[in-house]
Amino acid sequence: MSIFIINWIFLLALIPIAFFWLRRAWRIAVHRDFSEVALKRGLPPANAERYAPYEMIINLTGGVVLVGVLVAVLGFQALAREDWIAIAGSTLWIKLLASFALSRQAHGLGTGRQRGPGGSP
């Protein structure tokens, strides 16, 4: 019985996650708002417009897959429990890792410390 409840909580949690990701893609594509592109410590990179298409594709793909899972499970009951959990879980992790990798690429892979005159931090 407790697994059933956890599955429903996970399924219902996909709704705000998909909305948030699709809203971010919409803001980047339509409103040209780059304030949430490749964030690192809450700040976008100096050249956020360069990385905006990649962030938009990542968010759009993740949001569409989650909406597809929601429609398939709630609307058509076309996916078995193991299948929709695997698809949704994989999508969550891949999206998070792709956004993390993009933010590190946009901000640089260094430690972020400035070097002093003698080469010491």
Image (cartoon, rainbow, N blue to C red):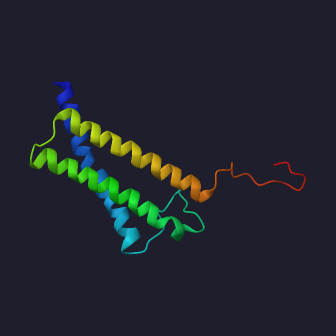
Q: Is residue 90 above or below residue 114?
A: above
Q: Quadrant of residue 10?
A: top left
Question: Is the N terminus in the top left, top right, bottom left or bottom right quadrant?
Answer: top left
Judge whether residue 41 can be spotted in this image.
no
Q: Is residue 6 left or right of residue 25?
A: left
Viewer-proximal residue among 13 and 65: 65
Q: Residue furthest left?
A: 76
Q: Is residue 110 left or right of residue 67?
A: right
Count every numbered label the image shows and give the total. 0
Q: Is residue 44 above or below residue 1?
A: below
Find residue 71 and report its horizontal and vertical position in percent.
16, 51
Residue at horizontal 52 percent and vertical 70 percent from the top: 49
Q: Is residue 120 above or below residue 42?
A: above
Residue at horizontal 21 percent and vertical 27 percent from the top: 3
Q: Is residue 88 left or right of residue 114?
A: left
Q: Is residue 114 left or right of residue 55?
A: right
Judge whether residue 2 can be spotted in this image.
yes
Find residue 101 and report its horizontal and vertical position in percent.
52, 50
Find residue 63 and report its horizontal and vertical position in percent.
30, 55
Viewer-proximal residue among 82 and 111: 82
Viewer-proximal residue among 24 and 54: 54
Q: Residue furthest bottom?
A: 31
Residue at horizontal 10 percent and vertical 49 percent from the top: 75
Q: Is residue 95 above or below residue 31?
A: above
Residue at horizontal 44 percent and vertical 60 percent from the top: 55
Q: Residue furthest top?
A: 1
